[in-house]
Amino acid sequence: MKTAAVSAPSIVSAVGEIKVDQLTCAIGAELSNVNLGVASRSPELIAEIRALLLKHKVLFFRDQDIDRAEHVAFARHFGELEDHPVAGSDPDHPGLVRIYKTPDKPNDRYENSWHADATWREKPPMGCVLRCVECPDVGGDTMWANMAVAYEKLPDHVKAQIAGLRARHSIEASFGAAMPIENRHALKAQYPDAEHPVVRTHPETGEKILFVNAFTTHFTNYHTAENIRFGQDYSPGASQLLNYLISQAFIPEYQVRWRWKRNSMAFWDNRSTQHYAVMDYPPCHRKMERAGIIGDTPY
């Protein structure tokens, strides 16, 4: 089955026509001749950027010398913003999460796995707007994968097997894993594991999305007579199937890789992508600021 195509309208912005350079065949486009500070005050630009986001799934921008208020104002056009219970937010701009990697915390490596942001929430973010404040001269790229294509390319028998499956997503087993047990249990009490469909439907494009990632711990309805013979999984059992599905994000043909520079920005559709922050740089500062936009309940 082909995924639904979403056409971007031909709109001329207040600062000239946006230039769109597609980066790979599967995902990603770099937009130029647009300033997101201006866009935060222009409904016409917001409409054009939304259409381009649905088409390309992650958008990239260079030389965005905007302030935090403009960053937040741009993101809020797409929905209300959320704070993160573990990563710190800017005190003057709630919802602007500071993802600061520093030499004094060499083991702070939560990002180097394929994931969609905060799928442990009942309503994971619809998208995120990330700005580079400071980064290494070399290294520290971020990669994104198109999970609509990942689903489309699955064998038909796998699509049939996972059509009705649901899975748990956990902050306790990810961000909470390194915490003292009392803190970890408190975190889970505040954010109980969420259950989502393994294949979700994109609410705007109708695409089918493979929706399991590093936050996913297990299937919740696999243990049925159709799948289990005598009380335990048979090969390929639930764990092998889940690992196989998660590994689909690893396929280079579904990916794009972005090299950061100061004042570069990325805006991605968190419903249809996963990303991976590559931690290949020596101990140094890598400072990013992210506005996460509240989404809907996956179905």
Image (cartoon, rainbow, N blue to C red):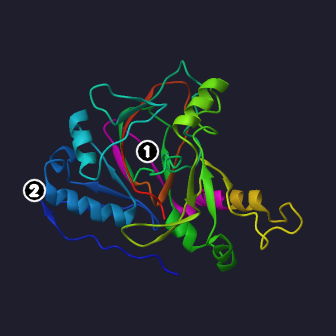
| Residue corresponding to mark 1 | 259
Q: Residue at x 26, y 47 (%)?
A: 76
Whether residue 42 is visible to the viewer of this picture, yes or no, is: yes
Query: Helix, strand or loop at disc 2?
Result: loop
Q: Amino acid at mark 1?
A: Arg
Q: Is residue 257 found inside the magenta-colored segment of the image? A: yes
228 is higher (above) or lower (below) than 294: below
Q: Residue at x 64, y 66 (%)?
A: 165
- The magenta stretch is 245-268
Q: Is residue 254 found inside the magenta-colored segment of the image? A: yes
218 is higher (above) or lower (below) than 289: below
| Residue corresponding to mark 2 | 14
Q: Are marks 2 and 1 in contact (CB under 8 Å)?
A: no
Along the line of sight, the residue nearer the viewer: 231 or 31: 231
Query: Helix, strand or loop at disc 1?
Result: loop
Q: Position of residue 184 (x, y in %)?
A: 61, 30
Q: Residue furthest left?
A: 14
Q: Amino acid at mark 2?
A: Ala
Along the line of sight, the residue nearer the viewer: 95 or 110: 95
In the displayed structure image, the side of residue 240 where residue 247 appears, left or right: left
Crowding at label 1, few (<14), some or many (≥20) Cα neighbours within 10 Å? few
Using the numbered discs, state the Cα–Cα distance from disc 2 to disc 1 in whole angstroms: 28 Å
- Residue 227, quarter of picture: bottom right
* Residue 268 disc label: none
Q: Residue furthest top?
A: 104
- Residue 264, quarter of picture: top left
In the displayed structure image, the side of residue 238 where residue 203 appears, left or right: left
Crowding at label 2, few (<14), some or many (≥20) Cα neighbours within 10 Å? few
Q: Mark 2 or mark 1: name the one nearer the start of the chain.
A: 2
Label 2 or label 1, whichever lies nearer to me, is 2
